[in-house]
Image (tube, coloured by chain):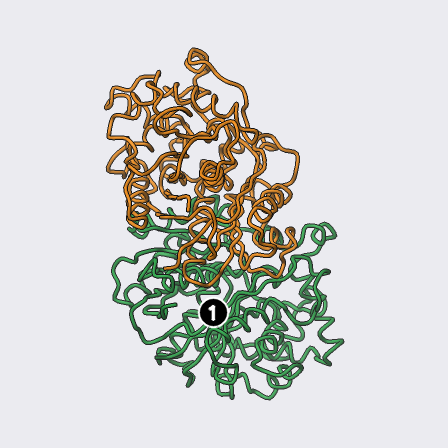
Chain colours: A green, B orange
Amino acid sequence: MASVWISGAGMTPFGRRTQSLPDLMADAARAALTASGIEVPDAIVVATMNPEEFLGEGNFASRIATHLGFAYVPAIRVETATSSGAAAIFAGFTAVASGTARAVLVVGGERMTHLPTPRVSEIIGRSIDPYERSYGATMPALAGLITRALMARSGLSAREISQVAVKNHANAVRNPYAHFRAPVALAAVMASRLVADPLRLFHCCPISDGAAALVLTASRAAVRIAGIGQGTDALAVRHRQELTSFRATQAAAKAAFAMAGFGADRVEVAEVHDAFTPFELIALEDTGLFPPGAAGRATLDGETALDGRLPVNPSGGLKARGHPLGATGIAQVVELVWQLTGQAADRQVSAHVGLAQSIGGLATNNFVTLVEAA
Amino acid sequence: MASVWISGAGMTPFGRRTQSLPDLMADAARAALTASGIEVPDAIVVATMNPEEFLGEGNFASRIATHLGFAYVPAIRVETATSSGAAAIFAGFTAVASGTARAVLVVGGERMTHLPTPRVSEIIGRSIDPYERSYGATMPALAGLITRALMARSGLSAREISQVAVKNHANAVRNPYAHFRAPVALAAVMASRLVADPLRLFHCCPISDGAAALVLTASRAAVRIAGIGQGTDALAVRHRQELTSFRATQAAAKAAFAMAGFGADRVEVAEVHDAFTPFELIALEDTGLFPPGAAGRATLDGETALDGRLPVNPSGGLKARGHPLGATGIAQVVELVWQLTGQAADRQVSAHVGLAQSIGGLATNNFVTLVEAA
């Protein structure tokens, strides 16, 4: 298998945006292409979770290719719910690694803030097993249930899961692409309104618009995809072996590290899927970045802060940078590329190897991507 | 790039089905897996155009993987509108060719007949450029416009485009998997009610439910994917260079033949995307199977009939076997595998090389797949 390089990365600011999704994707794609020096890619992979219902649009691969001025460039859409962006990176990786393409534009995004929040939640909630949904399960409800189990088993309290929000907001203050640019105090997080016990508003990521893009190439660039892995699990939460760790993340991490030929000890920065802040703690342990039960304490001790031993979500994460579904998995890797190449300005950390972890649905279809500075 | 083999093929009967889409996909997948002798694939590619709106379901890759009992097998969904099935074959091909998987289950399907026809048409119509849609363009309306232009330029009459329906219905009579199993007479086709001038009801494919599946492997089997190509074009019909031939098919065919290292003269059987019967004639010329302007005459002369020089749509095609969107591109290749391995029973032709051509949207995202008996 040939090496796959990231020769360009770009994204739009996340948040409430007035532009159309094709316009947002075009901005991200052009930024990535400009950075890469490639004018026309060989292939395009588009990631978006549900433009049909969010926007009333279909045939989105052709729509975006045409909008970019690349009507003649083969384009496909890839969808794995909230990890669609990471799945698109995997598809682009496979195309370059197989030799079917030498330069693939991977672009993802979502536009949702024009819809009422209950409608967005309903649409996203269809990722849940239909039987569990029939009992009223929503994403926050199931995340709350998992968090309760986590607290009962691990001794974690509201402090640890709230400190994740404090840290990620603090990072987002330094990130001009972030949805939220205001710091939050621990007391404010812990006093925010209850969403799904024990999860409060500031433990949950916002609904965001935005887009992100990468150019993957067979020709050498400053950053290499050292490993990429996908992991899956049963759709129904009640059918899982474990409630408080995600098999899908563990399997994805195992595959990614096996491909890379190195272990978690080499990782110096991570972007993980903190759609709900306790998921950051679960991710850090499932990927092997922290031993089981250690991520909460490490967070309180500042080990995952921007100036800590292992900065986690320097971008602000889903929690504060925002979570435009199809963009998210790509934006994580955009941030890592910027961190590895000294382009992260006020939030720059020192790192040569980065890890991105993305969750699809309620952890049914997850990806881990490892990137390494050349 | 390693060779990619088709070690198993299966499908459900197409038509008005009462089973759920996951059940239909499971039937097709199990048939393909049984034929292949493979119990658990390394990866799954799911093709479905719009389960969100047809069924109110999301996260469909995980849904199907779980339903098949393969919750731990990495699954993604691929979508390119009506060519999603063919795109999924391409994704599976790339995975095997790159060495990232050794056995990929490709399964596609759609369930639509429970919805009113106008609602189905509205959903499918979102594949059209939004500006053209704003003027009331629908799929049949644009196909009618293209057919009018074709008739004006090529001298084709209603007879040729009606004979395609007569031929494909005659083939479907012999196919137990077909939606329509009754023959139609030329006079009946030409007298059927007008849908979009000059297209009449019997020039248009039905709305069908169904599923189809293939198992692609790195290990040798009876049929090989000799070539596969994707071709694209501008979303808007008004931006095309040509109205009466499809750039997307031409580019896909060129890429597929280049990969195969042989030409159209080697093809002995074809399955093409006759969602509207004139599209069969366009496809035969765009793929190079017939010279420009020759497909209509050849059809009247019986050259594309089951006992003709080059049998086209021995399955009955989209017109008579049916068109469950996400299943269609896969079902075409299932038919070719059966034809190449002597499993086509009453509709068996003699062939060692077959061509499948699939159209996404209004010919914005097309695929050509070449299969060859080992």
* Number of callouts: 1
Q: Which amino acid does label 1 sit on?
A: Ile
Residue A189: quadrant of the picture: bottom right
Horizontal side of B288 relative to A86 (left or right) equals left
Q: Name the residue located 34 percent from the left edge and 22 percent from the top edge.
A: B299
Q: What's the chain of the residue with tag 1? A: A
| Mark 1 crowdedness (10 Å alpha carbons): few <14, some 14-19, many ≥20 | many
> Regarding mark 1 in the picture, which secondary structure is present there?
strand
Look at the image and tell me in which quarter the N terminus of chain B lies.
bottom left
Observer-nearest residue: A318 or A254? A254
Question: Residue B18, how many percent across, how many down?
Answer: 66, 34
Residue A142: give x, y in percent of width and height: 69, 62
- In the rendered view, tell whether residue B317 sits above or below residue A365: above
Front residue of this view, candidates B259 and B136: B259
Q: Which residue is drawn at 73% across and 81% down?
A: A155
Q: Can residue B326 be seen in this view?
A: yes
Residue B108 visible here: no
Residue A290 placed where, x, y %? 59, 83
Q: Which of B232 and A115 is in front in this view?
A: B232
- Residue at the spot of label 1: A228
Q: Position of residue A59 (x, y in %)?
A: 43, 44
Side (left or right) of A221 relative to B210: left
Q: Judge left or right: residue B242 versus residue B328.
A: left
